[in-house]
Structure formats: C-alpha cells, structure tokens
Image: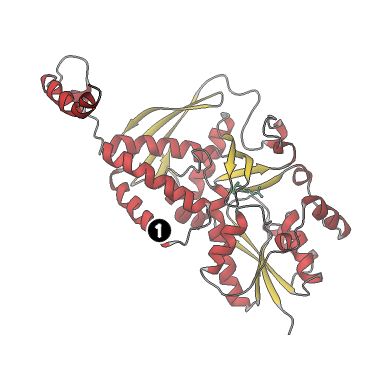
Amino acid sequence: MTEKAILAFSGGLDTSVVVKYLQEKYEMDVVTITVDVGQGDDPKQITAKAKKLGVKKHYNIDAKKEFVTKYIFPSIKANALYQKKYCLATALARPLIAKKVLEIAKKEKVTALAHGCSGKGNDQVRFDITMRAGSNLPIIAPIRDLNLDRTTELKFAKKHGIKIDNVAKKFSIDQNLWGRAIEGGVLEDPYREPPEDAFIWVKTKNLPTKPSYVEIKFEKGIPIAVDGKSKGPVQLIEYLNKKAGAAGIGIVDHIEDRVVGIKSREVYETPAALCLIEAHYDLEKMVHTKHETKFKSTVDDEWSWLVYSGLWEDPLKRDLDAFIDHTQKRVSGTVKLKMYKGSLRVVGRKSRHSLYRHDIATYGKGSTFDQKLARGFVELWGMQSTEANK
Ligand code: ARG
C-alpha cells in the first residue's frame, strides 16, 4: 500500500517544494489542505497549484471566523504582545491549522502528517506539538529533515517548473487576518531600514495631513463595534486593518528570540492588532483595580510566551485562559484612538464599570477626597523604607 501524507499547503515556495519531495524522495501520495485564516489567497488558484503538483486531493477550509473568535479574541483579552511587540499573528494561526489538518487526516486515513517548516523557526515547534496533542502519526518535515536552504529550494522549484512570485523571491512572508510577517532577504541586516516594497498593508508615503479617529466598543473584553457600527468578528478586523493601515499605523520592527534560541530580525504589519490591544489595555486600566492590573500583566506575559512557544495545548495555557476570561467581566466600554502620520494614541475612554471618580480625582472645587488622611497614609506606606535609610 502506498503511504499517504497530508500537508498543510499555502501554495508558496516551501510547501510546493515539500509536495514534490514527498512524492519523489519519500514515494508518498500527498493530500493537501489550505486553511483560510485570512491570508487573502484565491482558493481556486491554490487548488490549481496543488493539482498541478500532482496531489491526490486538495481541501480548502474557511476558518476565518473560528480564527478570530477562538484565537484572536483570547489574545486581545491577554493583551498579547510577545516581547512587548509581536501580536502573535503566525503563532495563533498554527494550532488552528494543525487542528484542521488532523480532522482531514482522519477522514483521509493518511499514514503521515507533513509540514513545510524549517528546523530554524518557531512554526515547527507549534505544528509538531499541536499535532502530537491529537495524533500519533509520524511527522515528516522535509525541509528540516534534509537540511534544505532557500537557495536550494528555489533551484529545486525551478527544476520542477514551480512558479514563485516576485515578493517571495525577496522575502519570506506569512500573513493572515491578524498580521503580515516579513522576514529574510535584506532584512537579515538588523541595522538596515526595511525597504518600501516590504510593506503592503501600511501606507508609508503621502500620509493624510489630517488626523483620523477610530472608536472601538468592547463587551467583556471582546471588540463588538467600531465607529458606532456593530461588526462581525472578521469584518471588524478587516475594517481596522484598512483604516489604521491607511493612516500609517501598524509597522513593527524588532529583534525577536525564537524558541530554538536564534535571535531574528522580524518586521510586521499589524494595524488592527496594534489598535485593538492598545485600546483594550487602556480600557482594562479604567475598570480593573490596581491589584488586578499588576497581577494580570504577569499572566498576560506568560500567556503570550506559551502561545509563541507552541504550547497552545498545554494545561497551563488553559488555566491562564480561565483566569483571563474571569477578569474580562467588567471590561466593557468604548475607547477612542487618534491616528496621525503613523502615530497612534488613546485620546478617550468610557465605561459603565469605570473606577475613575471625577469627584475624587479633581484638582478643582468640590473634591470629596480628604487630603488630611493622606499624611498618615504616606507615613505608614514609607515607614520601612524610611527606617532602612536611617
Ligand atoms: N517570527 C514570527 C513567528 O514566529 C513570524 C514567522 C513568520 N513566518 C514566515 N515564514 N515568515 O511567529
């Protein structure tokens, strides 16, 4: 019986090369699956690409809504920014793709699971671990197993008549609704500013000369309306990506620690993510006590780290989810953001659960805060420090 592998297929360089390797070197039949998490590719074109490579069967699965509600929304609740910068766009999509691969793997009764990840990145960690959480089938990763590099892949692709578009020749791209990651090529010099053509979502030239505003309404930590209009989950993210991108918001350029220990220079376009996380965190600070805010930020960091590191299925991640969900009960309200020539700033917030009290905070007349009490409070608060410094 011929062995049969299922491969998560994007139609890009890596996964196209992998199809051919599986067929020729591993002598396997290949079933491919493309999970639509908002990468914006045409399913018909991907199917045609897969068929041309000689796969036995190709599946297109639309998982956009599930991606937003089950993966992106929890990350907003966690204010998830790995190393304070990266919104986890790729990291969040991998466990969902792996889950869909396993569903089709069962249906197709495959004998192996395959992916197109290299041995240098994080995606192998995410795929392997989440696949292992639901299957004992062998995992084949030809690029990692055969130690292939990009130049070899490009040569191999040419030999097999695999067409690679021009952007892919310059950079390695991964994109979905939550963000666009751009790596490789000239970006590998960490001191070199990214060239203009690296960016597609975010406007970098001729930005509007007037500021624009966006209002985001949250209900229990989840964004439900923008600019006064209720929007479905997918629509809401798409709207913000467009609006903030047009105002020059969303570029992130930083040095990132990969799970395998490599430091890499990562460039992202993530307009909606930056707006939503900025707004959500601001709203949290209005409705949470200072104790909740302080403690939750440690939990948020841990959550981001686990998800980045491929541990979506770890019990600790689920425990943290339960805690985070519980903290969102009062995170309802509206936040107003101002965008101007690439800068983003919260300029207003309101909530029915606000702990902000004007009568206490005001420096004006009519304050109900009894300043006389502060003297004793400060003395006790600093007592040990004062003593230690004597
Ligand atoms: N560094 C990011 C991560 O590990 C993005 C990876 C994007 N992948 C790519 N092939 N460009 O999640």
> Which residue is nearer to you in this view: 154 or 330?
154
> Which residue is nearer to you in this view: 268 or 335?
268
Compared to 352, does 385 lie above or below?
above
Which amino acid does the dot numbered 1 rest on? Leu
Q: Residue at x 57, y 75 (%)?
A: 136
Question: What element does badge 1 sit on?
Answer: helix
In which quadrant will I find the N terminus?
Answer: bottom right
Farthest residue, direction bottom: 1
Q: Is residue 1 left or right of residue 227?
A: right
Residue 257, quarter of picture: top right
Q: Residue at x 61, y 34 (%)?
A: 202
Residue 198, quarter of picture: top right
Where residue 232 appears, x then y in whole percent? 46, 49
Farthest residue, direction right: 159
- What colouring does the structure picture have? secondary structure
Residue at image mark 1: 316
Where residue 67 appears, x then y in whole percent? 51, 55
Residue 203 in view (yes/no): yes
Q: Is residue 168 left or right of residue 294?
A: right
Q: Is residue 182 left or right of residue 351?
A: right
> Which residue is nearer to you in this view: 116 or 215?
116
Compared to 276, does 53 lie above or below?
below
> Which residue is nearer to you in this view: 15 or 388?
388
Compared to 348, does 104 lie above or below?
below
Where residue 87 appears, x then y in whole percent? 52, 43
Numbered-mark total: 1
